Amino acid sequence: MRSKQRSGQERTRSGRPARRVAYETLRAVTDEDAYANLTLPGLIRRYRLDTRDAAFATELTYGTLRGLGIYDQIIEACIDRTMSELDPRVLEVLRLGAHQTLAMRVPAHAAVSTMVDLVRATVSDGAGRFVNAVMRRIGEHDLDAWTHELAPSRDADPEGFLAFRYAHPPWIVRALRDSLNRYGPGSGSRDQADALESCLAANNEPASVVLAAWPARGDVAELTAAGAQPTRWSPYGAVLDSGDPGRLDAVKAGRAGVQDEGSQLVTLAVTGVPVEGDDARWLDMCAGPGGKAAVLAGLAHQRGAQLVALDQHPHRARLVEQALRGAPGEHSVVVGDATDEQWQDGSYDRVLLDAPCSGLGALRRRPEARWRRTPSDIAQLRPLQTALLQAAVRAVRPGGVVGYITCSPHLAETVTVVEDILRRNDDIERVDARPYLPGVPDLGSGPDVQLWPHVHGTDAMYLALLRRT
Ligand SMILES: C[S@@+](CC[C@H](N)C(=O)[O-])C[C@H]1O[C@@H](n2cnc3c(N)ncnc32)[C@H](O)[C@@H]1O
């Protein structure tokens, strides 16, 4: 009994730097537009957190960021002033406190006392009294009771209810619903309400680290020998359940890298669809930072093709160069605007266009993204996506193929762009992409492919294949 108590006290004490790390990461994300996945590891190192505290800090940071919009509604219901009157530092502490109280199994008294200590250390004693009072009000209900109190009723507004219950902005819930209706496994035939709920739940689960053994350089066997498990469908993939991928020799030596299985599958599909005639000139039109280019370069080498990898931004092009360092075969990296006539009409046999997009398909990996993105981002990206796909279908020769990929299932970024291009170009036809992801189940009614975290365990990657006639 005594030893149990002592270990509890140690946990609380050692939890303090972990909470400080979560607080500083949140400040950087909300105040400086930083990315949590880039900021957090540095702070974990700076505060020298051990493995357990690092795991606690990660769960606290990521969980708080995922739930931000919901926790703010709960905090708003517990304060006697407007949200804009709150000191942003105090708001951050309350958000962390709300997540610990409502979603982590931190005892209420520990959540209150650690948050009071944190706000005293970072703001003032007065703020400590305020946080104490608000935290107690937050703890009066559990998350189900808060949902009942603040969310719309499930019958009257199912998407509004799910948005609160699974901490997604309502416009993203509606976008996922529309995409599932069109491209979900049972689209058209099955009730998609369950699928939508599963999809939202999957976005709240941390994604595993998936590695790719770069074709012609690496070998999955080397990754599995180091403790990773082969992926279900990609012959190049392996899942690393724990540990830092950077410690693996294969990653250090550039024979493998981190890449979601969905990205591997859509890239392989673009290389798997037959072209008529020669298959020697490949273009990766938006290549930075170079994950898909690393797959393409190896396969191009094995098949006697040359790869050109283009990116508009010099720093992204440098990352592609790094990704291709050590790759065998003929490949070159070019800095340029792909919408700006970088090549003569019909110069390539195969073009992969992984378009800049909202990233709504990777919400599992970017906890802050759902609250940062807005519908106007989608509207702003659309002309660029259309111009890039138009450039891609001109870059490929008759008989060649274009793969249009987004890491977003939003219909305005996927099928709407593709159908726009099909309307404008009478020499472009759609190819059913599903046969080029062999063995992958539940690909819906096609012809395009939409992968899903809740179905395939991958990011929600979209692929359309187009052939120039
Ligand atoms: C989704 S990322 C590509 C990811 C990459 N295919 C990979 O797998 O690592 C989109 C890229 O498009 C680039 N980009 C944006 N506009 C471009 C343009 N007009 N021409 C060429 N590249 C562009 C961005 O710099 C960014 O690196």
Image (cartoon, rainbow, N blue to C red):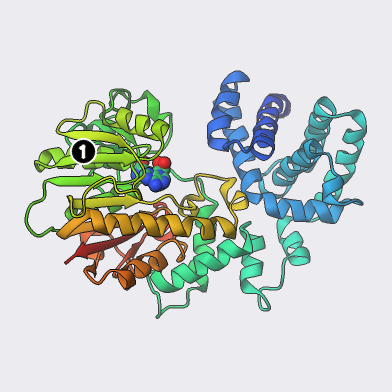
Name of the residue lying farthest toward the left: 277
Residue 444 visible in the current orientation = yes
Residue 303 picture quarter: top left
Query: Residue at point 20% right, 40% down?
Result: 307
> Is the residue 338 above or below the residue 190 in the image?
above
At which x and y percent is residue 166?
61, 59
Q: Residue at x 61, y 34 (%)?
A: 56
Q: Quadrant of the C terminus?
A: bottom left
Report if the beta carbon of the residue with label 1 is closer than 8 angstroms to ligand 1.
no
Q: Is residue 329 left or right of residue 116?
A: left
Other-residue count near label 1 (Cα within 10 Å), few / some / many at <14 / 14–19 / ≥20? many
Is residue 421 shown left or right of residue 281?
right
Q: Where residue 353 appears, x then y in whole percent? A: 32, 51
Residue at x 60%, y 56% (from the top left corner): 374
Ligand 1 lies in which image quarter? top left
Q: In the rendered view, does 66 fall on the left or right side of 272?
A: right
- Please provide percent x and percent y for residue 441: 29, 63
Q: Name the image quarter holding the N terminus.
A: top right
315 over 346 or under it: above or below: above
Name which residue lies at 66% across and 33% down. 28
Q: Nearer the viewer, residue 110 or 81?
A: 81
Query: Which residue has dot 1 on it?
Result: 297
Residue 236 occupies which quadrant of the picture?
Answer: top left
Q: Is residue 460 visible?
A: no
| Nearer the observer, 206 or 362 | 362
Q: Compared with residue 116, is residue 378 higher up or lower down, i.e. above or below?
A: below
Query: Measured from the top left, where is residue 300 in percent x and y?
Result: 16, 42
Does residue 136 appear left or right of residue 357 in this picture?
Answer: right
Q: Amino acid at mark 1?
A: Ala
Give the SS element for disc 1. helix
Pick the front one: 277 or 41: 277
Closest to the observer: 175 or 466? 466
